[in-house]
Amino acid sequence: MDQLSTISRGLLSIEINNTESGKTDRIPFLIYLKRAGKIVDADAYAHNNLVESIEISEVLRASQPGDELVIDAVNKDVTTMRRVVVIKSSRPVPQFQWFYTGIKKDKC
């Protein structure tokens, strides 16, 4: 989860190694944003339905700095595993800022 702070796009899924079969199983989860203790988009699909993967940009689209990204993983062995990530920045910082300064003496 530490690397999530630098990611704004990509497919998010939760996987666990199954020691019995030797395979990796996907864990279904709910994912949503909270702002000031309230869910940002209560009608969002991934808030109301378990998903096995989701494009993270769909969830972060409405985020603002200070929001909490909540991931509730539901495993058959464990009721709920919750992770909360605080959003530090909702938009990438622009690398360039262009300002109109008027026409120069050489008209360029």
Image (cartoon, helix red, strand yellow):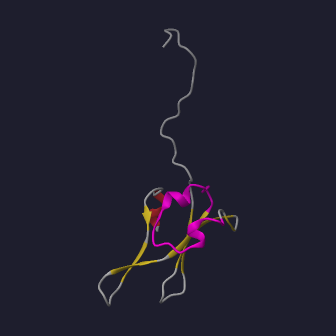
Q: Residue furthest top?
A: 106
- Quarter residue 16 falls in: bottom left
21 falls in the magenta region: no
Where does the image place residue 69, in percent across and percent down from the top left? 57, 66
43 falls in the magenta region: yes
> In the rendered image of this protein, does residue 29 appear above or below residue 92?
below
Name the residue: 35% across, 85% down: 18
- Locate residue 54 relative to residue 63 in the image: left or right: left
Where does the image place residue 17, in percent across and percent down from the top left? 35, 82
Where does the image place residue 40, in percent across and percent down from the top left? 66, 62
- Locate residue 16 relative to residue 60 in the image: left or right: left
> In the rendered image of this protein, does residue 21 appear above or below residue 96?
below
> In the rendered image of this protein, does residue 91 appear above or below residue 72?
above
Name the residue: 56% across, 73% down: 49
Q: Is residue 51 visible?
A: yes
Where does the image place residue 67, in percent across and percent down from the top left? 62, 61
- Locate residue 82 relative to residue 37 in the image: left or right: left
Magenta extent: 42-67
- Quarter residue 24 falls in: bottom left
Name the residue: 70% across, 67% down: 38
Count how many numbered circles sit on residues in the image: 0
Q: Is residue 70 visible?
A: no
Name the residue: 31% across, 82% down: 23
Q: Residue furthest left?
A: 22
Which of the pair 91/39 is nearer the observer? 39
